[in-house]
Image (tube, grey):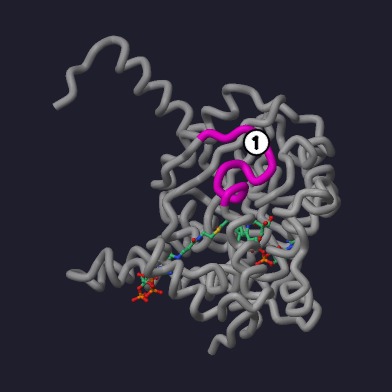
Amino acid sequence: MAFITRQNIRSLSSSAALRAAIKHVTVIGGGLMGAGIAQVAASTGHSVVLVDTSEDILKKATKGIEASLKRVVKKKFAEKPEDGEAFVQKVLKNISTSTDAASVVQGTDLVVEAIVENLKVKQDLFGALDKAAPQHTIFTSNTSSLPIADIASSTARLDRFGGLHFFNPVPMMKLVEVIKAPATSQQTFDVLLEFSKALGKHPVSCKDTPGFIVNRLLVPYMLEAVRLHERGHGSKEDIDVAMKLGAGYPMGPFELLDYVGLDTSKFIIDGWHEKDPDNPLFAPSPLLNKLVAEGKLGKKTGEGFYKHK
Ligand SMILES: CCCCCCC[C@H](O)CC(=O)SCCNC(=O)CCNC(=O)[C@H](O)C(C)(C)COP(=O)([O-])OP(=O)([O-])OC[C@H]1O[C@@H](n2cnc3c(N)ncnc32)[C@H](O)[C@@H]1OP(=O)([O-])[O-]
Ligand SMILES: NC(=O)c1ccc[n+]([C@@H]2O[C@H](COP(=O)([O-])OP(=O)(O)OC[C@H]3O[C@@H](n4cnc5c(N)ncnc54)[C@H](O)[C@@H]3O)[C@@H](O)[C@H]2O)c1
């Protein structure tokens, strides 16, 4: 049992206060990532509004969340399936949906943005939200590759703007990269660390540098795999098996590219190539570009490097 001292009473109450700061969460973008973030926030007792551009997308997102919750409870409540079903219903009740971001942020403590990986689109969104959200609301982006400071520059709340980079699939992946941009206040950063813990995740602190930690290492590796295949030095199947059995990765690089989405992968590579055109690590891949041009975006469209049922 922990020995209670004045000091740890103080730190307990301050971490409780930081946690209490976030009750209502608005997740913008109901795609792969936004749906997962909404699910996890709702599962940990937060009241969540999920926003996207159409009711159809939101219906699909809600169906996906329900299916994912059922997979979670199948394991978690294996002994008592009826408790599992009650949990699913309780979590779904914590989530509402909207196509009007500006009106729903009026009652929110935290915005987590997970829309398309495009700086201008993200800036336009946050510029509009900045006028509608209360002063205390913290804004965050789940961007994979864009500087948080650039996204935040369309707002007047630089101290209340940080990064929360989740990993796909959000319900399974334990890591959250919490990004402190130069103007992010220590209090905002502390609230975001505590929020990540409240979600049951393991946060790591990151500077606002390209790709933070994981993607700065992962993107060059995945691109090297594609180049190795483009040179004819290995089939995608063999490369995937090699990295799973030889390096212990749960998915090979081509499986993971299909899982992440080839459109998102291309946005990341093109953005970094534009900023650093002489860096061979970020050189575009003709094969990836061809697949994206053909609309083969990976698992989400049924075909990418592989065909998916
Ligand atoms: C070139 C540029 C590219 C850069 C990309 C950067 C992108 C980004 O910024 C960063 C990332 O996210 S990087 C990406 C980072 N991500 C990675 O690196 C991911 C690497 N992959 C993995 O860690 C594992 O393969 C998985 C955990 C995905 C699946 O586990 P598995 O053992 O291989 O196989 P399984 O049999 O399928 O599933 C087993 C069980 O897991 C559970 N479950 C799974 N999905 C679920 C969901 N959505 N909901 C709920 N539950 C889910 C479920 O219980 C299921 O059992 P069921 O009986 O079937 O229901
Ligand atoms: N796919 C991944 O593995 C992954 C992992 C970590 C981070 N990310 C980042 O998360 C973000 C979202 O990626 P994703 O894979 O979920 O993309 P996605 O294409 O699956 O979903 C994006 C969603 O945003 C919606 N959207 C676009 N513009 C909008 C707007 N102005 N307002 C409201 N909704 C809007 C789209 O309709 C779509 O449903 C990107 O910044 C991406 O880089 C992706």
Query: Does residue 306 appear in the picture of this structure?
Result: yes
Q: Quadrant of the C terminus?
A: bottom right
Tell me, yes or no, whether the highlighted magenta stretch contains residue 245: no
- Percent x, y for residue 87? 34, 63
Instruction: Name the residue carrying label 1.
Output: 162
- Residue at the image point whose x is 51% and y is 81% from the top: 237
The front one of 227 and 298 is 227
The disc labelled 1 sits on which kind of residue?
Gly
Residue 300 visible, this orientation = no
Tell which residue pokes out farthest to the top in this image.
6
**Nearest to the observer: residue 257 or residue 131:** 257
Looking at the rendered image, the quarter that the N terminus falls into is top left
Q: Quadrant of ligand 1?
A: bottom left
Residue 48 picture location, percent across and down: 55, 53
Relative to 237, 181 lies left or right: right
Q: Is residue 159 above or below residue 121?
A: above
Q: Position of residue 235 (x, y in %)?
A: 56, 81
Q: Which residues are magenta?
A: 205-217
Assign a secondary structure to mark 1.
strand
